Image (cartoon, rainbow, N blue to C red):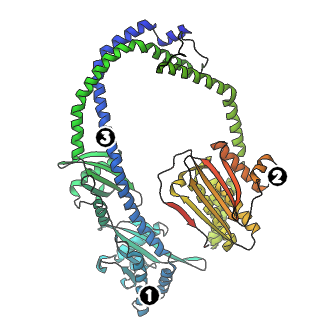
């Protein structure tokens, strides 16, 4: 065995040490220079990275405020579009002659309603609402305008209203952000207003708000003077559109470099100053947002560090060279032996090696490394022989047995045909039910074993749409999920069967009362819990343990529970799984799972309340 190790190393130990030592001494001087340059480069990169992290925190706040302001405008428009009072007024205005007194009174009522929504948002320049019959030909006397400071002459004309209406229709009537030619400082959010009469959608008009982007970025740039002068830039594609400095020409080149670059940050000189720049993309506006801060002082500090660091590094490396030459002969052979062991073990030859030296009594780090490597090889061999392969095969077989065995392609295509027929016949509820069921079938076709909580919640939304159409006011449901919890991984079709059982047994055992289903997700340090509870029914005491041991008959509920429980325990470990109990008049099922993928940063709560229908 000793001969085998020597052949692996290539030379007898004594000759190898002598030749390698002389070679190292000859090339060390060259390596010193390379190491110094490499070290200062790493230092500069580290400093830049730390600065990037510092500025990213500020920029995250700024971009978050920018996104939040835009989101507030979207929410206002959405609230106006779904305001029943406002839609009733628009419906009334639709049948009134233009320029009549009744028409003027109705328009004034609409204007007051819009004012109640928009007075608190000082980034909204103005709001326009107009009828939907022919946006480009709508006369000005039937257009509702609201603004705290902009005159009517500066608001939307007929051509601009037509362009905004066309963009809204291109997005199926849902809200969209739009830029108008000639208006560099503003961006418009437009949405079609609809109502339902006799199971049919009626287009009442369009609502459009103008957000003053220039004022918004000016306020964000002035919000925190902090660390140097700050500039915020916004641009579409390669064209710089807005700047908090108010002057675009000297920043065009800087913006173009950031647009073409794929780096997280850049240090760019413009004029007499150096700037540190980071950028992010704003999908809703299709714009690139750049944040730049003055970088003169940190840049010159890096230069001075570069000048001082190289001589110091040369001295340190020279001292290290002298010391390393003395200890090299003592440690090289042990490193060579350790490396040879690693090569032998990596080929799968895990039997203990006799290297001619006993490391078991050593207290130094190399001896401990040898002992730990030998022990690790023995443990791996035992694991492979006794447990590993056998357990992998058992787990694979169990997991495959739990997968669905039918291919629902034919059923899904049939549902799509039914949904198309229902739409053609004007059967809205049938169309909704079939569309939701089709979504569930499409989800079940996926080949992935795990999905996100967000994906599961989308399927539950489709499922509850069907149930609400069936049971109407007898069924209510609530969802409470932290925003970051939506990205947690979970075995596919885990929550939906639990919700289905809650609806089924809650409605069966409570024939007159309203069945309320509540879904919650919360996180612990290393795990997270999904809870589904419903009123109107109760579990048998110790039901899950009885199902596992076969003490009770596995009806549809038992089979689904055992399936979910076993999949969780196979994926996450035996300490995880389902918990079933009754609490204060509710039947409660909790699925406890391990966090296998890190969750995103904490955000707002994802809360839905569907108790109203």
Q: Within the image, what quadrant is residue 574 found in?
A: top right
Q: In this view, does 522 lie above or below 27?
A: below
- Distance between the alpha carbons at the discs numbered 2 and 1: 67 Å
Q: Can you give x and y, in whole percent of width and height, for residue 256 in the image?
A: 29, 51
Foreground pick, 64 / 185: 64
Residue drawn at 17 percent across, 48 percent down: 272
Query: Do labels 2 and 1 touch, CB within 8 Å?
Result: no
Pick whichever of labels 3 and 1 is earlier in the sequence: 3
Left or right: 77 in relation to 585: left
Q: Residue furthest bottom?
A: 101
Q: In this view, does 135 lie above or below 44?
A: below
Pick whichever of labels 3 and 2 is earlier in the sequence: 3
Foreground label between 2 and 1: 2
Binning the other alpha carbons within 10 Å of mark 3 as few (below 14), some (14 to 19) or many (20 upward) gives some
Q: Can you give x and y, in whole percent of width and height, for residue 348 in the image?
A: 59, 21
Q: Is residue 343 above or below residue 66?
A: above
Residue drawn at 46 percent across, 79 percent down: 133
Query: Do labels 3 and 1 touch, CB within 8 Å?
Result: no
Binning the other alpha carbons within 10 Å of mark 2 as few (below 14), some (14 to 19) or many (20 upward) gives few
Which label belongs to residue 47? 3
- The residue where tag 2 is placed is 552
- Distance between the alpha carbons at the discs numbered 3 and 1: 63 Å
Q: What element does badge 1 sit on?
A: helix
Foreground pick, 455 / 441: 455
Residue drawn at 58 percent across, 56 percent down: 521
Q: What element does badge 2 sit on?
A: loop
Foreground pick, 269 / 485: 485
- The residue where tag 1 is placed is 106
Pick the quarter of the image with the N terminus: top right
Foreground label between 3 and 1: 3
Foreground pick, 213 / 43: 43
Q: Can residue 2 be seen in this view?
A: yes
């Amino acid at each position: 065995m000793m001969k085998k190790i020597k052949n692996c190393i290539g030379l007898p130990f004594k000759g190898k040490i002598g030749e390698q030592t002389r070679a190292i001494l000859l090339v060390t001087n060259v390596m010193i220079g390379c190491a110094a340059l490499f070290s200062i480069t790493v230092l500069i990169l580290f400093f830049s990275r730390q600065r990037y992290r510092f500025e990213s925190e500020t920029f995250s706040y700024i971009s978050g405020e920018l996104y939040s302001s835009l989101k507030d405008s979207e929410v206002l428009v959405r609230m106006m579009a779904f305001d029943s009072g406002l839609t009733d007024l628009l419906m009334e205005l639709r049948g009134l002659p233009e320029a009549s007194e009744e028409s003027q009174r109705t328009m004034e009522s609409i204007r007051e309603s819009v004012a109640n929504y928009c007075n608190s948002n000082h980034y909204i320049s103005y709001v326009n609402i107009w009828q939907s019959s022919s946006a480009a030909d709508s006369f000005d006397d039937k257009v509702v305008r609201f603004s705290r400071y902009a005159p009517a002459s500066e608001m939307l004309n007929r051509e601009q209203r037509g362009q905004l209406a066309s963009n809204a229709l291109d997005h199926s009537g849902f809200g969209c952000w739009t830029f108008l030619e000639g208006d560099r400082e503003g961006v418009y959010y437009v949405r079609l207003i609809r109502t339902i009469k006799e199971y049919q959608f009626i287009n009442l008009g369009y609502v459009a708000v103008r957000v003053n982007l220039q004022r918004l970025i000016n306020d964000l740039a002035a919000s925190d003077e902090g660390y140097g002068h700050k500039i915020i830039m916004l641009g579409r594609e390669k064209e710089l559109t807005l700047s908090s400095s108010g002057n675009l020409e000297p920043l065009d080149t800087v913006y173009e470099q950031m647009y073409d670059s794929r780096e997280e940050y850049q240090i760019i000189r413009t004029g007499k100053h150096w700037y540190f720049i980071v950028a992010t993309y704003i999908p809703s506006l299709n714009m690139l947002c750049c944040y730049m801060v003055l970088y003169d002082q940190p840049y010159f500090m890096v230069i001075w560090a570069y000048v001082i660091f190289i001589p110091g590094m040369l001295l340190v490396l020279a001292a290290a060279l002298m010391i390393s030459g003395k200890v090299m002969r003592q440690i090289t052979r042990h490193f060579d032996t350790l490396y040879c062991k690693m090569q032998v073990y990596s080929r799968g030859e895990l039997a203990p090696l006799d290297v001619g030296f006993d490391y078991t009594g050593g207290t130094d780090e190399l001896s401990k490394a040898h002992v730990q490597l030998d022990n690790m090889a023995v443990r791996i061999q035992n694991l492979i022989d006794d447990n590993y392969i056998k357990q992998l095969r058992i787990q694979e077989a169990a997991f495959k047995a739990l997968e669905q065995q039918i291919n629902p392609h034919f059923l899904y295509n049939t549902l799509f045909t039914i949904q198309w027929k229902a739409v053609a016949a004007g059967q809205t509820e049938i169309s909704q039910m079939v569309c939701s069921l089709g979504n569930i079938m499409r989800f079940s076709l996926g080949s992935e074993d795990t999905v996100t909580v967000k994906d599961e919640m989308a399927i539950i939304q489709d499922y509850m749409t069907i149930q609400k159409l069936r049971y109407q006011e007898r069924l209510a449901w609530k969802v409470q999920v932290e925003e970051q919890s939506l990205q947690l991984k979970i075995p596919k079709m885990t929550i939906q069967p639990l919700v289905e059982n809650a609806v089924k047994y809650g409605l069966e055992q409570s024939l007159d009362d309203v069945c309320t289903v509540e879904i919650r997700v919360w996180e612990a340090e290393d795990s997270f819990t999904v809870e589904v509870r419903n009123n109107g029914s109760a579990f048998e005491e110790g039901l899950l343990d009885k199902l596992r041991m076969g003490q009770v008959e596995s009806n549809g509920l038992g089979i689904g529970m055992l399936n979910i429980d076993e999949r969780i325990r196979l994926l996450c470990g035996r300490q995880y799984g389902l918990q079933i109990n009754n609490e204060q008049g509710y039947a409660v099922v909790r699925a406890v799972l391990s966090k296998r993928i890190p969750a995103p940063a904490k955000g707002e709560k994802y809360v839905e309340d569907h108790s109203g229908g």
